[in-house]
Amino acid sequence: MLVCYLVIIKIECANVNYVNKTILKSAVSKEAVCLDGSPPAYHFQSGFGEGVKNWIVQLSGGGWCTNIIDCLGRTRDIHVGSTNIMKPWKFEGLYSTNQSENPDFYNWNKVFVRYCDGGSFTGDIEYVDPVTNLHFRGARIFEAIMDDLLAKGLKNAKNAILAGTSAGGYPAMLYCDHFHDLLPNTPRVKCLADAAHFIHV
């Protein structure tokens, strides 16, 4: 029985796929930065085989910050406020490279964009309060990451999906037409908003 459990654990561990973050340092010169001024980041896994020209780009979620204290707190959160402390991300489900688990997208280029602006990738405020040093530049983050991905091959995509979950789903809807316009030579461009229509009360 113990041998069976060890075999199962070994198989499950073998399927775990942690992908390191790509820090987009060039975005800082465009003032496309996270709440704490750190550069934006994403996790990228190259496509292969017949999926090499197919892309799925997901904007991660994590709610909104609604006041200064809340936004400052996020800068110390390993998930939503500072890429300086964000860890590798586990690619599974829609991001799995296992064909039996993920038959539709297993061999696509996969991008998981880290959420670090507190406002659903929509802010573009020039002023930075010297006391808090908070930056609200989510719209610039979106543009900077799209520019980087286009240069990495997204511009040659045959199929492309812009997806988002929760607070990342709102910009997936908001930027859907813009994403389509960035890919004039891509035959199929789709957008997926997952659990994104919510009322903040």
Image: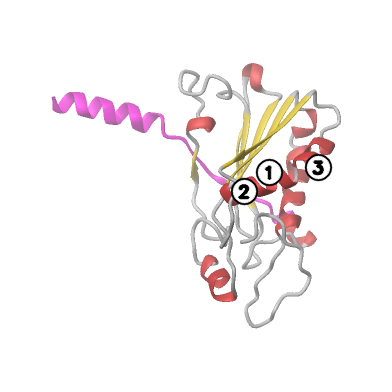
Give the number of marks.
Answer: 3
Residue visible at 55% across and 58% down in the picture = 80
Residue 53 image point, x, y percent? 71, 24
- Which element carries disc 1, helix, strand or loop? helix
Q: Are marks 3 and 1 in contact (CB under 8 Å)?
A: no
Mark 1: amino acid: Ala
Of pointers 3 and 1, the one earlier in the residue sequence: 1
Residue visible at 55% across and 24% down in the picture = 106
Q: Are marks 1 and 2 in contact (CB under 8 Å)?
A: yes
Left or right, 155 with respect to 6, comes to right
Of pointers 2 and 3, the one earlier in the residue sequence: 2
Residue identifier under label 2: 168
Q: Pick the residue in front: 82 or 102.
A: 102
- Which element carries disc 3, helix, strand or loop? helix
| Rendered-image quadrant of the N terminus | top left
Mark 2: amino acid: Gly
Which portion, as a residue range, is magenta?
1-26
- Which element carries disc 2, helix, strand or loop? helix
From this view, report whether residue 70 is shown above or below residue 103. Answer: below
Instruction: Say which quarter of the image contains residue 177.
Output: top right
Residue identifier under label 3: 178
Residue identifier under label 1: 172
Residue 133 image point, x, y percent? 65, 75
State the separation of the CA atoms marked 1 and 2: 6 Å
Residue visible at 71% across and 54% down in the picture = 141
Q: Is residue 114 visible?
A: no
Mark 3: amino acid: His
- The local crowd at label 1, few if under 14, some if 14 to 19, many if 20 or more residues have their Cα within 10 Å, is many
| Rendered-image quadrant of the C terminus | bottom right
